[in-house]
Amino acid sequence: MRHLEKAENIKSVIPSTREDTDLFSFEETKKIIDENKPDCLINAAAKVGGIMANNTYRTEFIVENLKINLNILEASILYPNMKIINLGSSCIYPLNAKDPIKEESFMTGELEPTNSPYAMAKISAIEIGRSMNTQYNHKILNLMPTNLYGPNDNFSENDSHVIPGIIQRMHQAKTNQNSKFKIWGSGKPLREFLYVDDLAAAIEFLIESDTNIDLLNVGSGEEISIKELAYKIKKIIGYEGDIEFDTKFPDGNPRKFLDSSKINSLGWKSKISLDHGLNLTYEWYLDNIA
Ligand code: GDP
């Protein structure tokens, strides 16, 4: 919303949040689409969380995400000219997909177990979208971002993703002058992070672009281990204690580096470096959460 409201070629952005529409209700979902008939619908709605939330609330992650996607897509069947950008996740790709992961790896193997329920809901949405494209001539583009971070993220201790999770816990460790800080898992997994404004810029770019590709990765092209990430955050926060590893927590996927060459060759590239994005995120956290 922050980004698209400022976009030159977009006349108006019609926001929809949990406050105005219950996406578990087909009637409410259909009503907001029928009443507004937008040129483009961006589906960024989901129940999301980090590795522990995904692995704990497995039932809610598949059931709620299936409902949300099913209602939005079914309510859109009558509007084949409405461009739909349907957001997914890099976890849709198989655990043993070759890195960097190309779009062609979709549905070629077994999923990573900590977030397979969430991934199955996102995979179902892609399959429904592809069916609508083939059968009813829709223009649904399934956009798969790598791990996202930035302002307005969920900074809770246990249910968040790694960047907001470590920021929240390490800021508290600094405040409480704790001499030790434990990161979850071995610190060895590699992750690729994309600042949320970069994703918004990619969405703006795709609204304008005339591609007929139906599945597209979007990543920063920058990969880092969780250990190195923790040290970067330590420096930004100014935490002076030692970092240790809590191997009671799962590592999840050892590596999921997206091949973003398709979107890059269309003309979009990530602009915000991890260092810059982490600084912006911590500033936002200090102003809004701490
Ligand atoms: P994932 O990319 O789906 O695995 O989701 P996360 O962002 O939750 O976790 C990424 C990696 O960071 C995993 O290997 C976690 O074990 C590790 N990690 C280390 N410390 C934390 C933390 O405080 N919170 C979270 N969510 N993950 C952490």
Image (spheres, rainbow, N blue to C red):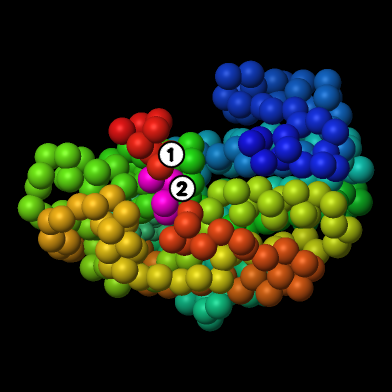
* Residue 279 is a magenta residue: yes
- Magenta span covers which residues? 278-282
**Residue found 52% across the figure and 36% down from its top:** 64
Instruction: Give coordinates of residue 284: x percent, y percent.
Output: 43, 39
Label at residue 280: 2
Quarter of the rendering containing residue 183: bottom left
Tell me whether circle 2 and circle 1 mark residues in contact (CB < 8 Å): yes
For numbered disc 2, what is the local secondary structure?
helix
| Cα separation between marks 2 and 1 | 6 Å
Instruction: Give coordinates of residue 15: x percent, y percent.
Output: 69, 28
Label at residue 221: none
Quadrant in which the C terminus appears = top left
For disc 1, the marked residue is: 284
Quadrant in which the N terminus appears = top right
Magenta: main secondary structure equals helix
Asked if the beta carbon under badge 1 is closer than 8 A to the nearest atom of ligand 1, the reply is no
Quarter of the rendering containing residue 225: bottom left
For numbered disc 1, what is the local secondary structure?
helix
**Residue found 24% across the figure and 52% down from its top:** 238
Q: Is residue 248 visible?
A: no
| Type of amino acid at the residue the image marks with label 2 | Leu
Q: Nearer the viewer, residue 178 or 250?
A: 178
* Residue 76 is a magenta residue: no
Check disc 2: other Cα within 10 Å, few if <14, some if 14-19, many if 20+.
some
Instruction: Give coordinates of residue 223: x percent, y percent.
Output: 46, 71
Looking at this rendering, what residue extends furthest in the left direction?
A: 179
Q: Looking at the picture, does residue 216 appear above or below residue 171?
A: below
137 with respect to 112 (left or right): right
Q: Is residue 66 visible?
A: yes
Q: Nearer the viewer, residue 108 or 154?
A: 154
